[in-house]
Amino acid sequence: MDLELEGGTADLVLTGIDDWWKLAALVIPDPDAPLPPVRVHAATAEPVWWTDGTYDVVAAIANSGDTDAEVTVEVAVPDGWTSEPVTATVPAGTEQDVAVPVTAGPEPAIERLPLTVRAGGTELETGRLVEVVAAPDPARAALALDAGPDAESVVPGYAALTPESDWDADRGYGWNGARPDARDRRNTDLLRRDLVVATTERTLDLAIPAGPQRVWVLTGDPLTDSAITVVSEHGAELGRSGPATLPSRAMTWFSFDLDGGPEGRIASLALTGSGLNKMWRIAALAVLPQ
C-alpha cells in the first residue's frame, strides 16, 4: 500500500481487523536522492520447471547513464543445481534482459533463488529472490497428476486429478470409494494453486508399473497452514509430509517407494491427515522409475 505523509516525525499505529496485522517491509524514499545509472527493474522466471531441466532466470537491467555498462548477473543455486554467471553489455539509455541459465536438480523441490547483480565490478543488488517449483518431468513419469477441482488449471503434460476422477483402468488412476473435496486458491502457479483435500480417509488407486518405482507428492497449502499428509497401504505407512504441520503458504514435496513386482500392480493408497483439522492435501503426484 502507499501512504502520503507530511515531513517530520510520524507515529504510525498498526492494527488488524479480525486478525493479526502483518508488516513485511516499510520504505521511505528520498525524493532528492540521485538514482544510480544502472538499476535492476525486475527478476523473473517460469514458475514451474521440470527436474534436470534448464531454464532462464531473467533480470531486467536499465541503464540511464551516458555510457554503456558491463553487467554481470549471478544466480545462487542449491546443491545439485547448476548455474554460471552471465555478463552482458547494456547500452546507454536502454533497458535489456539478461538471461541466466539454471539447471534444476534431479529431485523435485521448491527453491527461492537469490540474484546478485554487478556493474563495472560494483555490486548493485543482492538478495532479490525468484521462486520456482521443480516438478517431475511428465515425459519420464508413468503417472503425472495435477490435483484440483477441475481440469482448467492443469500444468501442461500433467493429467487432472479431480474429485470426479473415479478409478479408470485405462487411465491408470482414480478414487476407490468416497471422493475428496477440492480447493482452488488462485494465488500462485498452476501446479500449486489448487488441491484435493479431505478430513477423513480417502483411497487413491494407482497403476504401478513393474519394478521399483518412486512416488512424489506435492502437499501443503498456498493460503493457510496445513495438517500432516500421510500415505499408507494395507495399514503400513509409506510416507508423510514431515514431522510437523506446515505453516501458512508453505508447500513441500515428499516421496516414498513402491514396487510394482514383475508385472505391475494396482496400489491402493490410503490418504489421511494428522494434526490441526486432519485435512490432508495433495497438489500433485508423480510415479517415476527408480
Image (tube, rainbow, N blue to C red):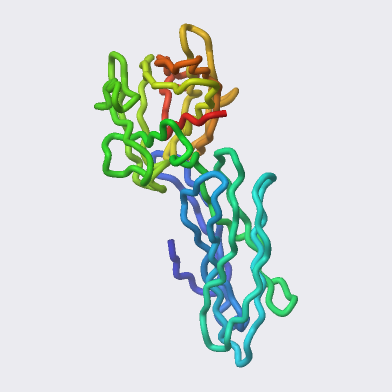
Residue 79 in picture, x, y percent from top left: 69, 45
Q: Residue 196 sits in which quadrant?
A: top left
- Could you tell whether 222 is left or right of 154 in the image? right
Residue 107 in picture, x, y percent from top left: 58, 38
Residue 174 in picture, x, y percent from top left: 32, 23
Give the number of marks: 0
Q: Residue at x 48, y 25 (%)?
A: 227
Image vertical order of residue 245 relative to residue 238, above or below: below
Image vertical order of residue 266 relative to residue 152, above or below: above
Kindly tell me whether residue 145 is visible in this rendering: yes
- Residue projecting furthest to the top: 235
Q: Quadrant of the N terminus?
A: bottom left
- Could you tell whether 222 is left or right of 237 in the image? left
- Residue projecting furthest to the front: 262
Image vertical order of residue 67 relative to residue 20, above or below: below
Q: Residue at x 52, y 84 (%)?
A: 94
